[in-house]
Image: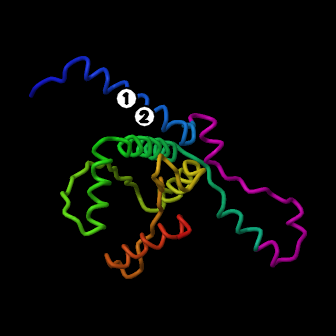
Amino acid sequence: MQEEPLCEKNTRILEERLMTNDILKIIPEMKINLELDEQLRILPDYDANIRIKPIPERLIGLENIYRIYIPNKMSREIYCKLYLALLHSLQKKQTILATKQANENYKRIKNQSYQSILGNSDSFTILGPSGVGKSSAISRSISILTEMPVLEIGNSRIIPFLMIQMPADCSVKGLLFEILRMVDETLNS
């Protein structure tokens, strides 16, 4: 394997840093430690007068318990994983390969001759026992990371995160329709 010349390598590193700086202006600043815990935490207001209210109102007030969210180590790790995934994904969208892929996709849409370009992707899996709070941690993290549900980079509109629930029938077709429905809903299209 031939090593990249030092000048080209330094130029590439500088370009990546500049891209990262532009991207960091678009996405929210990464939260850590107490600031992150404060952002993740949900503690609904407690009204002490609820104790003297009629039973139906007290029962409705009890539903606030389900809104409580206390962050733990797992939720912090999930937030960091999602933040870094967003950062890496946006970096890849500003590369030459991404531009070539967009041009080839456009040709395909116009029924012109095109070449398929295989892109790379990053992925990770979040595993844990049922009921430990994985979905809640993901939802809380995404709500912090998506201050803007659609990012505008150049002439592109990017949806940073799209939360999709598997349809009840577990069909691939249903899942694809749900993805399209959520994209339309997010873009107001």
Category of crowding for the residue at label 2, using alpha-carbon neighbours closer than 10 angstroms: few (below 14), some (14–19), many (at least 20):
some
Name which residue lies at 54% across and 42% down.
Answer: 26
40 to the left or right of 175:
right
Q: Which residue is mark 1?
A: 15
Mark 2 residue element:
helix
35 in the magenta segment: yes
Name which residue lies at 23% across and 17% down.
Answer: 6
Q: Which mark is residue 46?
A: none
Percent coordinates x, y for residue 82 in the rendering = 45, 47
Percent coordinates x, y for residue 183 in the rendering = 47, 66
Quadrant containing the N terminus is: top left
Q: Amino acid at mark 2?
A: Met
4 to the left or right of 121:
left
Category of crowding for the residue at label 1, using alpha-carbon neighbours closer than 10 angstroms: few (below 14), some (14–19), many (at least 20):
few
Percent coordinates x, y for residue 62 in the rendering = 73, 68
Query: Considering only vertical position in the picture, is 184 above or below 12?
Result: below
171 to the left or right of 118:
right
Query: Considering only vertical position in the picture, is 10 above or below 19?
Result: above
118 in the magenta segment: no
Name which residue lies at 44% across and 33% down.
Answer: 20
Q: Which residue is mark 2?
A: 19
114 to the left or right of 86:
left
Q: Amino acid at mark 1?
A: Glu
Looking at the rendering, the stretch of residues picked out in magenta corresponds to 32-59
Q: What secondary structure characterizes most of the magenta part?
A: helix
Query: Considering only vertical position in the picture, is 167 above or below 154?
Result: below
Closer to the camera in the image, 171 or 152:
152
Proximity of marks 1 and 2: CB atoms separated by less than 8 Å: yes
